[in-house]
Image (tube, coloured by chain):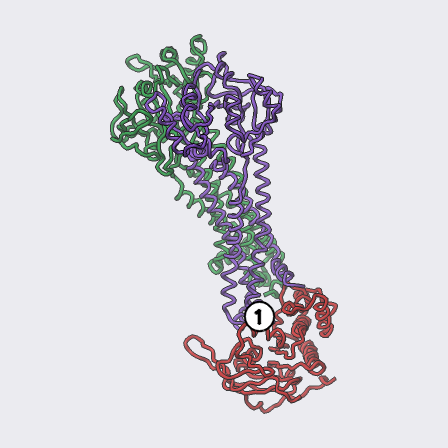
Amino acid sequence: MNRFTLIWRNLWRKPIRTVFTMLAVLVVFFLFTVLEGLRIALSLSDVGIEAQERLLTSHKVSLIMMLPAAYQSRIARLPGVAAVSHGTWFGGRYQDNPEFAQYPVVAEEYLALNPEIKLSSAQRQAWLANRGGAIVGRPVASQYGWEVGDRVPLRSSIWTRNNGSNVWEFDIEGIFDDTDAGMNAGVVLFHYDYFDEARAFGKGTVGWYVSKGDGSMPIENLMASIDAEFENSPAETKTNTEAAFAQEYAQQFGNIGLIVTLILSAVVFMILLVTGHTMAQSVRERIHEMGVLKTLGFTSGSIFRLTVLEGLLLILPVGILAMALGRAALAFVSGAMGAMFPAGLHVGTQSVVLGLALMLAVSLGSVLPPVIRALKLDIVALLRTA
Amino acid sequence: MATQLIQLTGVSKNYRKGRETVRVLDGISLGIDKGDFVGLMGPSGSGKTTLLNLLGGLDKPTEGLVEVDGRVISALSPGALAKWRSSNIGFIFQFYNLLPVLTAARNVALPLLLTSLPASRRKQHVNTALQLVGLTERASHYPRELSGGQEQRVAIARAIVSDPPILLCDEPTGDLDRSTADEIMDLLQRLNRDYGKTIVMVTHDPRAASFAHRVLHLDKGELGAPPEETPGAPGGTSP
Amino acid sequence: MFGWLTQTAALAALNLRSLPRRPGAAAVAMSGIAALTGVFAGVLSMASGFEKTMEGSGQEDVALVLRSGSTAELNSRFSSEQADVIRYAPGIVRDAAGEPRVSSELFWIVNAVGKSSGTEANVALRGIQPAGYALRKGYRLAEGREFTPGRFELIAGRGARNQFAGLEPGQMIRFGKTEWLVTGVFEAGGSVFESELWCDVNVLQSAYQLGSGFQVVRAQVDGAAGRARLEEALDGDQRLAVDVWSEEQFYSEQAEDTTALIRVIGIPISVLMAIGAIFATLNAMYASIAARARELATLRALGFGSLPAALATLLESVALALLGGVLGCAIAWLALNGFQASTLASSFSQVVFNFAVTPDLLAQGVTAALVVGLVGGVFPAVRAAMAPVTVALREL
């Protein structure tokens, strides 16, 4: 028998209640973790470090408008630009799955600009050697079960081939990892030359330019000087960092995401209130016993500590388990839906801290008020409560 | 034997009831010797329990001094009082006040949590106390599995486990039938006689009071003369 | 003793009357269920609102001609010659003057600033021909005047005007190099078109160097039969490679991805929440029984049966769930019904829609609440029935 025995026995005073409270906590924090993962994924706020430094130049009027391929050399000549390449939205889908990201690119340039793409040198050589070859991010390859050497058809919602078909076939020559777990993680990359030659229209255009500064001037100035270069031309441009671009894009879904987040936080809050109420009730039930402990010589301080520890014991272990399960569920979902969530579904330290803070808030918030009120009473009053 | 263990000097206690102030105890002076067994009787509301609470340091007098073993306990801070209580006082209540979530042995062990005794010594103390009250075989039962008399014996074991010199009993037999009450009184008498515990016991029951060395009568907050009929010792109580 | 039904009624009445005496537990069970119902109705009302907007957009007697293989207007393209071929094809309804009721259109995307987000969003700028107005069910000019063909003028859908800045009649708005005058605001029966900006298709062609081509031809057809005739004619034409859609089907397919996403996320979450709410209800009901243990035991001692005791407990839980469910629905309805939101749809442009908390959804929400109430009440009810009278009486 030690103090922990006392806490432990008190925790299981009404085993059914304790179990149900724990299960409610389990469900709530599991939900919390999964939703955090979804929220982060949908906000595209986790784009990686490289994306903060890369610039993306698109048509000023709209992302869907193409830019002349000739802009590449003009951007390359600008002072402060270290490297420039381009990409184009292909808008393909595999079988009946949802559309995901594929870009026709100039391989060497694009890989140089995106060092987070880790491809073995053998696969790199193979890709460079095959005009119809493509490389693919691991999450997508594992969702669709693609392996090196497979020939996969992608149906584009935009690009028709010279022969009138919009189904394009590519040889998978490599599967890469994205060390940034950023925007490139789930993309299919193939050769621009092959694409440009085979497409029925839009030849000689690209979707956007991606560039990197040489560090000689602040990034804001570089962005301004690129846009200034094409001012008053038929296709004016808008340049931003890749990260800002991604976030702006995500904002377009924002309305829905925000509403979902609001509704769900209301719910989490309410279920936690329910749990808190039950805990507070359990403390109130034993005010008389607190009086008994005091007659035995327990101080207010030690009774306070016993009760608070019990509250933490009720919430924290289960809450932490729930968050671990939530993370496992997220990992499972991102494995199964690699094309939709190429960067994976994660909860970062911030979410974990937020979750722990919520747990503390619930257990302390429900236990402290009744225990403080009880301990303000003198022993005689405590003993008199039945 | 003649040392005054407990000394009350001019002790009064007021309670506020709404706007009125009720004087529950009025200028009580009283000395209790070490090893004494005092019964405290009186009608309901006469202040018996209040007096007991003052002796145990659960409550503080409005006026006057409560000294125990030369220490003015009415002047101690709540923390110091709690510590003092854990080593000097054992409480026994009418409704036992065992914690329902703990077994008999763990209920008994409860006061030992406040000591620095090693686990093995604690176990030893608990066993001794349970043996003394004759409940060794019920050690792992929960309070709800015990009869009223057994529960009270566990409560007594809990009161004596840290070997306090003073036992304060508030109607210890109030909830028990006659023969069980006699068993409990025998036990208290034994603790007083064989182990030198000083006992102050509030009771309604003249039969229980007859086990005491002397009986004080409290009426309207004052110690008075016993009523006409002094309870005599009933048969079968002497060993 | 009287029958179990009467007994149950008597006990249930007693239980319910004692509810105000223990507001805490009752409120707790109710609010947990209210939250569940509110979210359930809220999430689904978003999906149903989006669906309603999209499905209300298409008409059965309007045919949509897109380039073969295109699943969105954005990816489709024709030359003006091809558009003319389609215009005079059979199956298309003609007006009194013999002109086909056809609007060849361009679907363009421009950036406008969202009022609530403050960031740029893709908004559809649609170039139409004069027949285009009549091809939209419920088209009505709500404010200002229509754009003048040949000028850089546009009219804004009501939803677009509400969600994006700078679209009040009389304001100038710049998209790229061109400045446009907003001349009016239109309604189109709450359809997806209300999320768009409309202008003269020829002006749009020249404003962004789009050449003389079009992306989509909309034509009034004589029902499904007319559409079939049109399809047959166009399929047989060597100059064309097009698909003919029923406009209705086109928009309901466009809605699918988004509503599926909302449901795929929303429904498992609602189920998990329901489980959480069940635990909360179980706790509240056990607490309720514990609080009334003596009362129950006394009644049992008086001769009330155990089945009525159980049923009355179950009734109480269901009543609480019902109250919570109604409360949650009321909150969802008051807070969300008609709430306007926008999202990026598969047309790659913003679609403005209203949350639709339909009676159907409310019924589903209350049903979910009742299920929670039943499941959350069954075990406590068994407990209430099983508790031996003497123990219950002794425990207090």
Residue A114 can be seen in this image:
yes
Q: Residue at x 34, y 20 (%)?
A: A234
Question: In the rendered view, would you say A95 is above or below A346?
Answer: above
Residue at 41 percent of width and 37 percent of height: C356
Colour given to chain B in the rendered image: red
Neighbor class of circle 1 (other Cα within 10 Å; few <14, some 14-19, many 20+) is many
Instruction: Identify the residue at image location x=59%, y=75%.
Output: B84
What count of labels does the image hold?
Answer: 1
* Residue C9 seen in the current view: no
Display colour for chain C = green
Which quadrant of the figure has residue A238?
Answer: top left
Q: As rendered, which of B97 and C168 lies closer to the eye? A: C168
Letter of the purple chain: A
Look at mark 1 in the image and give the residue it sits on.
Answer: A294
C59 or A266: which is nearer to us? A266
Subunit of label 1: A
Q: Position of residue C36 (x, y in %)?
A: 49, 45
Q: Position of residue C325 (x, y in %)?
A: 47, 46
Relative side of A118 to A258, left or right = right
Tell me: B90 left or right of A53.
right
Residue extending furthest toward the top: C238
Instruction: Indicate the quadrant where residue C234 lies.
Output: top left
In the rendered image, the residue lying farthest to the front is A216
- Image check: C182 left or right of C359? left
Looking at the rendered structure, the secondary structure element under dot 1 is helix
